Amino acid sequence: GCEESEGSEEQGDRGETEMVKAAPKKVAAKSGALAGSFQRKPKNARAKRALKERESKVVEGDRNALFMRGTHTSEAITELLKELHDLKKPNSTYFSRRNDKRPFEDETSVEFLCQKNEASLFGFASHSKKRPNNLVLGRIFNYKIFDMHELALTNIKTTSSFKPSKIPSNQNRPVMIFQGDGFESDNKLSELKSLFLDMFQHSSPGKVNLAGIEHTIVLTAKGDKVGFRHYVIHLKKSGERVPKVVLEECGPSFDMEVRRQQTASPEISREAMRVSKSSKGKLGKNMERNNMGDTTGRVHMQKQNLDEFQVRKMQGLKRGRDKELEAQRADKAAKIAE
C-alpha cells in the first residue's frame, strides 16, 4: 500500500510532496512509536534542538494547524478551507493538492501528517452526495487524535462576497464571542466551543491593547445549528473615554451542524488537561493547596496574656448606664404629666 500526501504552499524547504511508503499496519506502529514508546537518539546538535522543541513544556506555545482537502471537494468548501487557513496564519499549513484520507475510518494517516508538520490541530474538507460540504476539525494529543468533529456546512459565503472597508491583519488574534445557552447546556456544542478556542484563541492575554483588536469571530448557537460570522472591528469616537464599537462583516460566513463526533476517553482527557505543579508556583512554608485549588496556610504565634490585652472602652458598655437612662425617662414622663 502506497499513500501520497500532498504538497504545501507554506512548507518552504520541506518540499511540496511527501510519500508514506509503509503499509497501514507499519504506519500505525511507527506513529505509536512516536507517541513515546520509542525515543530517537539525536545524531547532531541540530537534531538535539529539534527533539527538545518537541518535548512537553510547562507553558505551551502557539498551536499549529494543518488544513487539507479530500479527493472530492466543491468550490465553496475549498475556498472556505483556504480562508480558515488564512485566519490561522502564521501558525498554519495548507496542502493544495488532494489527499485520499478519511479521518473517521483511518486515523493513522492523519496522525502521521500532523506529526510530520508539527500540527496539533487539523481540518479536512470533502464533498459527496451523501455528505455535501463536509468539514472535519480535530485536535492531536501526544501524536494521537484527541477528538474529531464532523460538520455539515450550509449558507457558505467567502470573503469575496463582502467588501469591507478594512482588512484585518493575520498577526492579531481574533476576539472569540459565543452566543447561546447551547454552548453551556449541550455537550456537543461545549466540545465544539473548546475546539474553536484552541484553534483561534488558545490562551487569554493578560493585557489588551485596543489598537490591536481588529477582528472578532462570533459563534451563535440556535438549536442544533451554529452560525460562524467574522467581523472587522471599527473604533469610532464617542466623546467619552471608551470608544464606540462598530462591527462590519468581512467573511467567511457559514452555518454548521454536527454530523458525527469522536470524543476522547476520560483517561486521555485527564492526562491532556493535567497542569504541572511548577506552573502554579512554589508554595511557601506552612502553606498547602486543597482539592479546589485554594491556597491555605498556618500561622504560628506565641501564647498571649489576655489579662493585659488592651480593648477600647465604649460609653455604652459602662456599668450603671441603664439606670441613668431610666431616670431620664422618668423625668420626661413627669414633665409631660404636669
Image: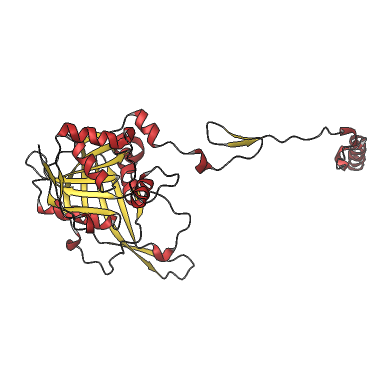
Quarter of the picture holding the C terminus: top right
Compared with 289, 7 (above or below) is below
Compared with 323, 170 (above or below) is below
Residue occupying the point 30% across, 49% down: 219
Kindly give the residue lying farthest to the front in the view shown.
Answer: 43
Q: Is residue 179 left or right of residue 311?
A: left
Q: Is residue 27 left or right of residue 182?
A: left
Give the x, y percent position of residue 122.
24, 45
**From where the camera sits, is residue 11 visible?**
no
Front residue of this view, candidates 188 and 141: 141
Residue 231 sits in quarter: bottom left
Front residue of this view, candidates 223 and 287: 287
**From where the camera sits, is residue 218 visible?**
yes
Give the x, y percent position of residue 261.
24, 35
Front residue of this view, candidates 143 and 225: 143
Quarter of the picture holding the N terminus: top left
Give the x, y percent position of residue 321.
90, 37
Q: Is residue 81 left or right of residue 265?
A: left
Compared with 7, 280 (above or below) is above
Color encoding of the figure: secondary structure
Kindly give the residue lying farthest to the left in the view shown.
Answer: 129
Give the x, y percent position of residue 48.
36, 48
Numbered circles on residues, count: 0
